[in-house]
Amino acid sequence: MLTIGGTVGAMMTPLVAGGTIYLRYTRTDRRIAPTWKADVVLWLCFSMMLALASYAVYRIFT
């Protein structure tokens, strides 16, 4: 049960980060939008979450 919960959690974090990126570019008012540095960190975090989730799923199913 712990392995299944960890796998589902690992697959959900990139979805949450992707939703954050979507909302950042579609729903954020330009007057209060974050700087390009915050965008770089956001994309970097999304990439790392996606890589770790892919690795976790790979390790479980191989």
Image: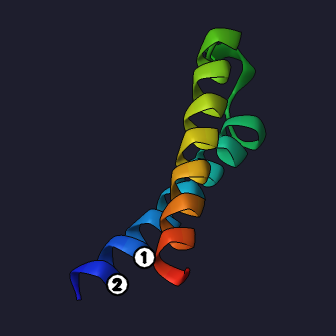
Disc 1: which residue:
8
For residue 20, above or below residue 60: above
Residue at position x 44%, y 64% in the image: 10
Which amino acid type corresponds to the residue marked 2 in the rendered image? Ile
What is the x, y in percent for residue 3? 30, 80
The numbered disc on residue 30 is none
What is the x, y in percent for residue 21? 67, 42
The residue nearer to you, when weighing 58 against 28, is 58
Which amino acid type corresponds to the residue marked 1 in the rendered image? Val
Disc 2: which residue:
4
Instruction: Describe residue 31's horizontal placement relative to residue 51 as left or right.
Output: right
> In which quadrant will I find the C terminus?
bottom right
Say which element carries label 2.
Answer: helix
Which quadrant would residue 48 be assigned to in this image? top right
Q: Are marks 1 and 2 in contact (CB under 8 Å)?
A: yes
For residue 45, above or below residue 35: below
